[in-house]
Image (cartoon, rainbow, N blue to C red):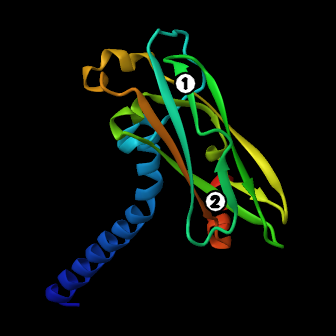
Amino acid sequence: MTDTNRKNGRTAVIVGLVAAGMVGMSFAAVPLYRIFCQVTGYGGTPKQVDLASETVIDREMTVRFAANLNHDMPWDFKPEQNKQLLKVGEQHIAYYQAYNPTDKPITGRASYNITPDKAGSYFAKIDCFCFTEQTLQPGERVDMPVVYYIDPSIDEDRNLDDVGEVTLSYTFFVVKDDEKVKTVAALKQ
């Protein structure tokens, strides 16, 4: 084997490894970005927390609720209340209702955000139907809770002095069979 052939072979292996690495990173980007947004509240994504706030302040805010469906999701999906008025730091529970009018089981996953985006990092969810996939049987109707509060540190952010109302919005998507297989495989690892 000549030096040129060896160099060409080494270059081909390096290019192949770089390409494989880039493909792997593209598959990892979505879940990593979602985790980043959940932890930081970036892009209007609420934070996921384990415990309620220990502090409640006098500032009141209104939380509005919105529900959307991806074009291929046949469910009926809506909030059971349009809005809630709460004190900042106070734990609340809101309910959404989903109904599967079809004759087959359907699994869905909800994505969510807060508007205005700048308030997303102060909206904290303790428990939510959106943390896991939801499977509804044919004709099944369920009430799905979200337990949340607005972090009292919002009061220290002068950039949010003008925010008196936030909207919590969910969009449900059908989970395809191949996505279920990937999710189950990832959980077994």
Q: Do the residues labelled 2 and 1 touch (CB within 8 Å)?
A: no
Instruction: Please tell me whether mark 2 or mark 1 is closer to you in this view.
Output: 1
**Residue at left 51%, top 9%?**
55
Q: Viewer-proximal residue, 126 or 56?
A: 56
In this picture, is 143 found above or below 22? Answer: above
In this picture, is 17 found above or below 166? Answer: below
Label 2, residues with CA under 10 Å away: few <14, some 14-19, many ≥20? few
Quadrant housing residue 93: top right
Q: Please identify the quadrant where the N terminus is shown.
A: bottom left
Q: What residue type is labelled 1?
A: Leu
In this picture, is 160 found above or below 68? Answer: above
Q: What residue type is labelled 2?
A: Thr
User: In the drawing, what numbered circle is on residue 137?
Assistant: none
Q: Mark 1 points at which residue?
A: 85
Gap in angstroms between the C-alphas marked 2 and 1: 37 Å
Q: Position of residue 146 (x, y in %)?
A: 64, 36
Q: Residue furthest left?
A: 4
Label 1, residues with CA under 10 Å away: few <14, some 14-19, many ≥20? few
Q: Where is residue 31 in the image (x, y as percent from the top left)?
A: 48, 53
Q: Mark 2 points at which residue?
A: 183
Tell me the element at label 2.
Answer: helix
Q: Which of marks 2 and 1 is nearer the N terminus?
A: 1
Q: Viewer-proximal residue, 100 or 121?
A: 100
Q: Where is residue 49 in the image (x, y as percent from the top left)?
A: 55, 28
**Residue at left 42%, top 28%?**
122
Tell me the element at label 1.
Answer: strand
